[in-house]
Amino acid sequence: MTPSPVVAAITGTGLWNAPDVITNDELVASFNEYVELENTRNAAAISRGEAVALEPSNVEFIEKASGIRQRYVLDRRGVVDPTRMRPYFAPRPNEEMSLQVEIALGAARDALAMARREAADIDLVIIACANMQRAYPAMAIELQQALGASGYAYDMNVACSSATFGIEQAANAIRAGTSRAALVVSPEITSAHLDWRDRDSHFIFGDVCTAVVVEDAAKAKVSERFDILGTKLATKFSNNIRNNAGFLGRCEEVDRNAHDQLFVQEGRKVFKEVCPMVVEHIGGHLTQLGIEPHSVARYWLHQANLNMNLFITRKLLGADPGPERAPVILDEYANTASAGSIIAFHRNREGLAAGDIGVICSFGAGYSIGCVVVRRVQ
């Protein structure tokens, strides 16, 4: 008798919030003070036409462009200091737990508790996020040790699609039998790679960490779970979202605070190119699974920009989905890179009945798109 195929399921999610909040009003006040200081310092060059005066920002521009109203950050003091414009992080000795693993622990433990799993049940740990604080040893291996998990662990970076790509890797390991239960964690310290001096992007990101437990549905300890019906990933190279920071910088004599060593993007080009790609990607994936877009009860999309999410869901559904069907959390959290769609899933999965279908989808630099289609089981 042929054994039934293994079904991978999401049985637990966790969320860690950064301790500080910066509202748009506070951020704009800080940015505009920085602009005034810079324009005063460069006044002579500006008057000679050798430099361009910086433009101030405003709350209306931020909220219209993005839908963001505030963001959580690990260190507010350094960000809103107009003479610094970046967080303060104290260096830690090798013997002390790294910052990323420290915040990862909170989300990981919450996800394990929801799944009613012990750390010893986990034999695969993946840290999947947009930026790692070091090259090696892998952050995931440090987290594996801190939790007391077994098996193996590795880091992966697919920018804002890291979490969904990580979920596919975890699901594949479960189906292949190389893992019993996996943990995908996304500690996004985005405040460290954001250029807070750039008017077009200084408002975009916030800090957070999410975690997801993926395991064999037949062996789950909880009755409420989300079976993974399918995953679909895609990448296409583009320079329109880029961060050039890397280990070659010391050899190239670059300034680590230079604009291109931080997050940079051509926002209008990204919108124009990525949104149709995401619509086609989700639609094609649902077609492969025999599911109509209108029958999807909830879309947990990447939380980068409200206008992008509205474009995508309107194209898929032919109408405005409303906040319940396509929940938005970026007004509170801002863009949290790969963690955004997982926050939306974690905080907005109530009200679904057994058998309801949902889509978790992320998209970002690369370009990269990750789609995870799930069905609620109770």
Image (spheres, rainbow, N blue to C red):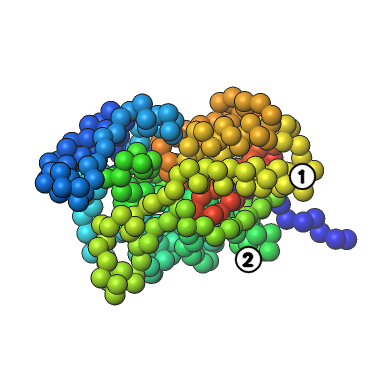
Count of marks overlaid on the render: 2
Q: Report the residue at 36% width, 41% height from top.
A: 200
Q: Give the residue type at disc 2.
A: Thr
Q: Is residue 120 left or right of residue 350?
A: left
Q: Is residue 6 visible?
A: yes
Find numbered disc 1 in the image and state the secondary structure of the residue it sits on.
helix
Q: Is residue 314 above or below residue 169?
A: above
Q: Position of residue 117 (x, y in %)?
A: 54, 49
Q: Report the residue at 31% width, 69% height from top.
A: 249
Q: Is residue 224 left or right of residue 184?
A: right
Q: Nearer the viewer, residue 26 or 354?
A: 26
Q: Is residue 328 left or right of residue 312?
A: left
Q: Report the residue at 51% width, 67% height from top.
A: 152
Distance between the alpha carbons at the discs numbered 1 and 2: 29 Å
Q: Is residue 376 above or below residue 51?
A: above
Q: Position of residue 154 (x, y in %)?
A: 48, 65
Q: Which residue is mark 2?
A: 178
Label 2: how many Cα within 10 Å (few below 14, some 14–19, many 20+): some
Q: Which residue is mark 1?
A: 287
Label 1: how many Cα within 10 Å (few below 14, some 14–19, many 20+): few
Query: Is the N terminus in the top left, top right, bottom left or bottom right quadrant?
Result: bottom right
Q: Is residue 119 visible?
A: no
Q: Give the residue type at disc 1.
A: Thr
Q: Position of residue 8 (x, y in %)?
A: 67, 52
Q: Position of residue 26 (x, y in %)?
A: 25, 31
Question: In the rendered structure, are the residues bearing label 1 and label 2 in contact, judged by CB atoms less than 8 Å apart?
Answer: no
Q: Report the residue at 66% width, 26% height from top.
A: 319
Find numbered disc 2 in the image and state the secondary structure of the residue it sits on.
loop
Q: Nearer the viewer, residue 286 or 96?
A: 286
Work out which residue is located at the far front of the displayed protein and give it. Answer: 48
